[in-house]
Amino acid sequence: MVRTGSASVAAGPTLAVVAREAGVSVPTASKVVNGREDVAPETRRRVTEALDRLGYVRRPRFDAAKTSGLVDLVVHSLETSWSGAVLHGVEAAAHDAGLELVVSAGPTRNRAGRPDRGWMDKLTARGSSGVLFNLAELTSSQYGWLDQHRIPYVLIDPVLEPPPGVVSVGAANWQGGVTATEHLLALGHERIAVVAGHQRKMCGSARVAGYRSALAAAGTRQRPEYVQYAGFDESAALRRTLELLDLPEPPTAVFVCSDHMALGVYEALAERGLRVPDDISVVGFDDLPEARWTTPALTTVRQPLSEMAATALRLLVRMMEGDRPESTRTELSTRLVERASTAPPRD
């Protein structure tokens, strides 16, 4: 058996118990479990809530030792160039491996923060042989569901620290934060701020930790007011940058923890009549296409998104074949891409 997550979950209630709890017949509950469409929305809601409340675990619909040739990619959204790069990497690697790919776009939690069963129902109905999750926030019950069903899975750039034993692929975020900050220090900047993502999320905290480490290694003063969190949101990054510019001693350089947020930083600087890099230097993170389209072009830390996705697919294939990766965490290197948004500080 392929073990990919937390400890095995004890057998849950029968489908008959779930049907009784939801006030429906067993065949109706079975339709919901198997992703059938011919169920009224209100009935589906009652059954789904009963499934979650009782911790019902579906029986496997496929033999993990006999792959179906079908894998799923569950992404948070398909509307960004980030997800496009991930999809490109997974699709190419799946083609090389002779696998079919199904993409599901949507969060793994609903608006109330509860587990979203949509991808679970579809996965069961299709009999997919493995799953890749990109930027997903899985709950303990979802990890348990995958484990109980013996479905191999790999996380691409997990948002939160996964449970022990879960296989994941990401970038060297801490080193990327170090590299970005060292670049600005080498140019002569001492007043370096950071516009970060989420304080509790893996990549955001790692990049800020790298920033702090580089300042400490250089003996440069660390200023708490120079650390701002914008949740990877462009509008929030604009507001945090304006707050930085209103400080008695505003920064001469800003390390922005995503290229998307850097667009908001650029807008804030333009609003104050400041020029990049003449008045303030900016370094981003990701090396998305937007980094080349800005004026001036953005110096940024490249993380290899397509390569990360392809690596995750190859690891998944090994797990589908019954092999176990030597390490549960794979990190790919980041590197600085110098463009026109950084320069020495003005005298």
Image (spheres, rainbow, N blue to C red):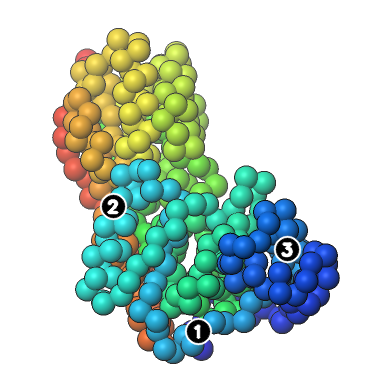
Circle 3 sits in a helix, a strand or a loop, which is it? helix
Residue 283 in view, yes or no: yes
Amino acid type for the residue under numbered disc 2: Ala
Residue 326 in view, yes or no: no
Quadrant occupied by the C terminus: top left
Circle 1 sits in a helix, a strand or a loop, which is it? loop
Q: Residue at x 22, y 29 (%)?
A: 294
* CB within 8 Å, label 1 to label 2: no
The residue to which callout 3 is attached is 47
Q: Quadrant of residue 322?
A: bottom left
- In primary-sequence order, the first of circles 1 and 2 is 1
Residue 283, x across and y down, in percent: 28, 34
Q: Is residue 268 left or right of residue 50?
A: left
Q: Is residue 177 left or right of residue 126?
A: left
Circle 2 sits in a helix, a strand or a loop, which is it? helix
Residue 20, x across and y down, in percent: 83, 70
Q: Cα distance, mark 3 to mark 2?
A: 37 Å
- In primary-sequence order, the first of circles 1 and 3 is 3
Q: Is residue 124 left or right of residue 180?
A: right
Q: How crowded is the residue under tag 1: few (<14 C-alpha within 10 Å), some, or many (20+)?
A: some
Amino acid type for the residue under numbered disc 3: Val
Q: Which mark is residue 62?
A: 1
Amino acid type for the residue under numbered disc 1: Phe
Q: Residue at x 71, y 74 (%)?
A: 27
Question: Closer to the camera, 74 or 287?
Answer: 74
The residue to which callout 2 is attached is 85
Residue 193, x across and y down, in percent: 39, 30
